[in-house]
Image (spheres, rainbow, N blue to C red):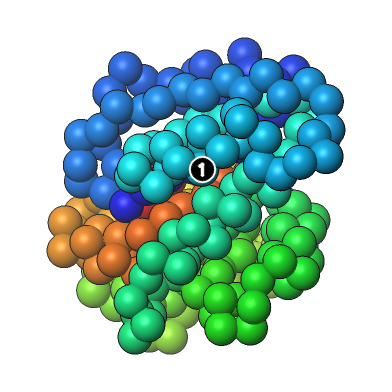
Amino acid sequence: MDNLSVGRAETAQNIEKYSRPRISFGGRQDKLLHVVSHMNERSQCFPSPEQGCLIERAGAKESLLIVAGPGTGKSRTALAIALQKIRSLPSTSLSRVLFLSFSNATIRRLAVSAGMQFSASERKHLKFMTFHSCAADLLSHYGRFVGLPYPTMVADKLQERLLAIEAEHDEEGEGYWGFLMSLAKNKGLLAFSVLLPLASRILSASKTLRRVVSRHYPLIVVDEFQDTSEEQWRLLHVL
């Protein structure tokens, strides 16, 4: 599995906390390549030499971290890399390029851009999700292999609070996490706060499952990477 992460240059210092000399992606020890793009102005010719280099490096199955300022074409470059990957897939492939971000707004923006640049057949190989919706999807499909009931359902905050009041659990109490886990294991109700840890846990526990997910998503693109939390990073790490 290849990974492309895109972040704004002005918050590059936040990205450093996720940097590692060597890192495992998809069960493979791989060097995380930091690419700082110095595209300071909007280029009227796409791709620019820097963007073309990034697209070429991604085709060589390298994990890339792109850091550049606003308006420099980071998302456009990411979409071009995704298109390159999709066109390399066999015609019968069911694999998809997965776009991840922390916010629904970013995902909607990327989906709109892809809709204008990709053909209908190419769009079938795209998947846009937030980290939490990705975790919920993984738990829905594979949670039963680690003891979760099938089907699972994500509980909204109001439902979670009502169930906590009914069970006389305090949200700030020591036993609250155990209460949320019991909801997941006994009723298949997934509170928002357990989605990322549980998804990371099932992927970490099964090499076979990681291979299945890796085949389904041979390329993962993370937009606005500088805003990725520790929990989101852990999920990306095991993906």
Nearest the camera: 201 or 53? 53
Q: Residue at x 42, y 37 (%)?
A: 57
- Three-letter code, disc 1: Ile
Q: Residue at x 83, y 33 (%)?
A: 42
Secondary structure of the residue carrying tag 1 is: helix
Decide if residue 43 is in sight here.
yes
| Residue 17 x %, y % | 50, 18
Q: Residues within 10 Å of mark 1 (few under 14, many from 20)?
A: many
Nearest the camera: 147 or 122? 122
Name the residue that disc number 1 marks.
55
Whether residue 66 sits left or right of residue 71 in the image: it is left
| Residue 149 x %, y % | 36, 81
Q: Residue at x 56, y 38 (%)?
A: 52
Whether residue 215 sits left or right of residue 99 in the image: it is left
Q: Is residue 210 above or below residue 154?
A: above
Q: Residue at x 43, y 76 (%)?
A: 140
Nearest the camera: 127 or 35? 35
Q: Residue furthest top?
A: 13
Q: Is residue 20 above or below residue 209?
A: above
- Residue 141 appears in which quarter of the rendering? bottom left
| Residue 60 x %, y % | 34, 43
Nearest the camera: 29 or 154? 29
Decide if residue 14 is in sight here.
no
- Residue 154 appears in which quarter of the rendering? bottom right
| Residue 191 x %, y % | 56, 62
